[in-house]
Every structure is written in C-alpha cells, then in structure tokens.
Image: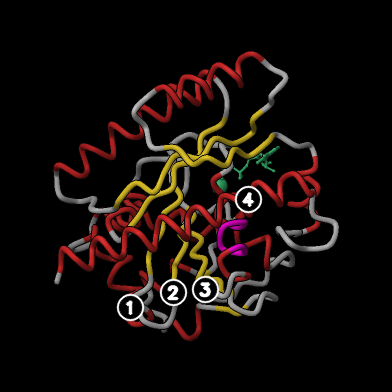
Amino acid sequence: MPAEHIAVANHKGGVGKSLTSVMLAAGLAQAGWRTLLVDCDPQANATSMFDPDDNVEFDLFDLVKERTPLSKVIRRTRLECLDLLPSTLAVAQLDQQLVAMHRREDVIRNALEPIRDDYDTVVLDLSPNLGMLVIAALSNADSLVVPTDASRWGRRGVSMFLEWSEQLREARVLNADLLGVLLTKYEPTTRVSRDVLADLQASDIRMFEAVIPKRVAAERMVADCTVLGDQGADPDLSNAYARFTVEVMNRVVDLQKTRGRHHA
Ligand SMILES: Nc1ncnc2c1ncn2[C@@H]1O[C@H](COP(=O)(O)OP(=O)(O)O)[C@@H](O)[C@H]1O
Ligand SMILES: [Mg+2]
C-alpha cells in the first residue's frame, strides 16, 4: 500500500503544527510505521529537532527546483523508522518559484512519487500561510490534521481554515480526508480554554479526543530536541501525543479500508 500522506496544517502560526508534526512522526515511527517527516516550512523547526547543528546540505527547495535526487535529500534520523526531508530558509523562495511553474499543484506529489511505496506514512509540516507551497502540499495529502490552540482567535482561525480548505476541495485541488482537529495548548484552569474546548465539541467539527496541554516544558523539549518516549520528555505532553498518535493510526487504518472498498 502506498504511504499515507498526512498534512499538518493551519494558516495560524504558533498553534503547535511543528511540535505536533514531530511528535506524530516520532510516535508513528516508534509504533513501527516507516515514516518520512517532510519539513515544508522555511522556518525549519521540525528539521531542527533532528538536525540541531543546522548542517542540511540539500532540502525541499533542491528537490523541487533543482531536481536533486531524493536519495541525496532524505536523511536518516536517530529514530529507527524515521527519516527526514529537511527544510532551510531557501524553501521560502519556493512560493515565488511555484507561481511560474507548470502544474504547480502537483510538484510535491511528483517530487515524492518515487518513495510512495517505501514508507507507511509521510507527515508534512506546513507553514502558517495559504501560499502556493501549502496548496501543493495539501493537494498531495491523503489526510489532514489541523492543530488549533485553545484561544478565541484560534477558535475563529480553525473555522476560517476549514472553510478555505472546503473551497480547495470544491476546486478539486484538495482531496484529503480530515482526520481531525487537535486542540493544543489547553489550560484546564482557564475559562477561555474550557469554553473553546466545549464549543469545538458542540460543533460538527471532527475532533481528536486527545487534547494537548499547555506545558512550559514544551520549550525545553524543543531546546533539547526531545520527543515523546525519550528520557526527560515531559510526561503530560508525551502521554497526550501518544494518545493522539494512536487515534491517528486508527483513523488512517479505517480510512484506508473505506477507500479500498470504494476503489475495489
Ligand atoms: N503544548 C504546548 N505547550 C506549551 N508550548 C507549546 C506547546 N506546543 C507548542 N508550544 C510552543 O509554542 C511555539 C509554537 O509551536 P509550533 O509547534 O512551532 O507552532 P506552529 O508550527 O504552528 O507555528 C513553540 O515555541 C513551541 O515550543
Ligand atoms: Mg511550524
């Protein structure tokens, strides 16, 4: 079966897309799923979790624009089942470059085509905008995870993002199934957090049951390049992301069965 391409997306910044991508990719790899983490954000936050010394030689820009072979761009990580397709600041130029490229919505799909059968899943960390690269990554996705922080603007943003993705769906650019919306930075002691959770649960938006707590330790995990399951990882964050990973796996398996029936 070809790899399930899961895009982690939201046009709002700081909602935990990169941390979620890294934790999900690490969690899937630890569960034995051969996983490729594709960093599509020029901020390269996901990359830095596995390459703290910033010594990326080839990145997504080289792959898409310079046609550098995947074998040169993809790197192994310290986790057995996890590989990384890194980003650097150069990826910021891709948005501009894509505008002039033929069949630009397909560039990510075409670039990753040769390794479709080498992985069980490909996790794509997207940047916080609605630019061409995000559209190309979304158009290549089979499924979608939308993290949103437990704030008023986060609540508003997630509805906006889902509406925008519906427009892409109607334009036949997006085909991905929404795996779910993941509430992040949740603080049970604040009323805003509790209100946002209750409001999302009462809506018809498909949520993950796992909720990611707001923890000061998140910053330390990023600084130390610690992922779930590592010694020194914050237990609350690790447990929440582990529960989320299991939900993703179950939903992917269910979807693949349904799609299989439809395509049979
Ligand atoms: N659950 C959390 N609790 C506290 N801080 C978090 C949490 N998740 C992410 N952060 C912090 O918030 C910032 C933004 O997270 P990030 O994953 O980079 O978001 P995005 O990729 O959506 O911009 C980072 O500094 C990160 O360490
Ligand atoms: Mg990010």
Between 221 and 34, the one nearer to me in the picture: 34
Is the Cβ of the residue at disc 2 closer than 8 Å to that at disc 3?
Answer: yes
Pointer 2 residue: 120
Q: Is mark 4 within 8 Å of ligand 1?
A: no
Task: Indicate left or right for 106 with 125 as reference.
Answer: left
**Residue under circle 3?**
33
Q: Is mark 3 within 8 Å of ligand 1?
A: no
**Quadrant, the C terminus:** bottom left
Q: Gap between marks 1 and 2, in whole Å? A: 8 Å
Which portion, as a residue range, is magenta? Answer: 22-27
| Quadrant assignment for ligand 1 | top right
Q: Earlier in the sequence, mark 1 or mark 2?
A: 1
| Type of amino acid under label 3 | Trp
Residue 125: percent from left, percent from top: 49, 55
Three-letter code, disc 4 = Tyr
What numbered label is drawn on residue 241? Answer: 4
Q: Amino acid at mark 1?
A: Met
Q: Position of residue 30 (x, y in %)?
A: 63, 70
Seen in the picture, residue 162 relative to 66 is either above or below; the reply is above
Q: In whole angstroms, how far apart are the C-alphas of marks 4 and 3?
A: 16 Å
Task: Residue 24: say if magenta.
Answer: yes
SS under mark 3 = loop
